[in-house]
Image (spheres, rainbow, N blue to C red):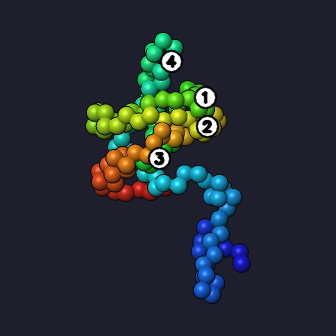
């Protein structure tokens, strides 16, 4: 049966059949992603001799497991960084992460946190008034 919505669930007897596109099947980002306009982000890249470079980035979405960002300067995959999240000018989280995805043409990057950050997840849910999920 052709369904205009590829992720729609259709009932067939006592079973449910879920149709997913190949892009949805290959999506490894399983946590709920939040879109937050009230949080700003910057990445802290440690270079040679422990020199540190802070770069502002656009936070596209975030979860307790990772984040999607946009950065105007190219960054290599597997590069380890610290993601600084700021709210109202104050640093609220510093999270160790590494780059696991990049799209140079759109300047979009994917970050995977070194460990799950349940405190961040709790903060994202409790501090958001108009929840936007992706």
Instruction: Report the residue marked by disc 3.
Output: 65
The residue under label 1 is: 76
For the image shown, how many numbered marks are present on the structure? 4
Q: Are marks 2 and 4 in contact (CB under 8 Å)?
A: no
Q: Position of residue 83 (x, y in %)?
A: 43, 33
Q: Are marks 1 and 4 in contact (CB under 8 Å)?
A: no
Q: Residue furthest bottom?
A: 13
User: Closer to the N terminus: mark 2 or mark 4?
Assistant: 4
Closer to the chain start, of discs 2 and 1, is: 1
Mark 2 Cα shell of 10 Å, populated few (<14), some (14-19), many (≥20): some
**Marks 2 and 1: CB-CB under 8 Å?**
yes
Q: Which residue has dot 4 on it?
A: 47
| Picture coordinates of residue 129, whole percent (x, y) | 30, 55
Mark 3 and mark 2: Cα distance apart in space:
17 Å
* Distance (Cα) linking label 4 and label 3: 25 Å
SS under mark 4: loop
In the image, residue 104 sits, relative to residue 33, either above or below, namely above
Indicate which label's residue lies in the foreground, 1 or 3: 3
The residue at the far top in this view is 49
The mark nearer the N terminus, 1 or 3, is: 3
Name the secondary structure under disc 1. Answer: loop
Element type at mark 2: strand
């Amino acid at each position: 049966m052709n369904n205009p919505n590829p992720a729609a669930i259709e009932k067939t007897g006592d079973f449910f059949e879920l149709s997913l596109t190949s892009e949805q099947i290959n999506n490894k980002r399983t946590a709920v992603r939040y879109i937050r306009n009230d949080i700003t982000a910057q990445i802290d890249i440690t270079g040679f001799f422990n020199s540190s470079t802070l770069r502002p980035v656009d936070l596209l979405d975030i979860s307790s497991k990772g984040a999607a960002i946009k950065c105007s300067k190219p960054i290599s995959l597997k590069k380890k960084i610290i993601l600084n999240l700021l709210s109202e000018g104050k640093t609220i989280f510093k999270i160790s992460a590494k780059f696991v995805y990049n799209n140079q043409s759109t300047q979009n990057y994917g970050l995977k946190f070194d460990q799950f950050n349940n405190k961040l997840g709790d903060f994202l849910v409790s501090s958001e008034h108009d929840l936007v999920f992706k």
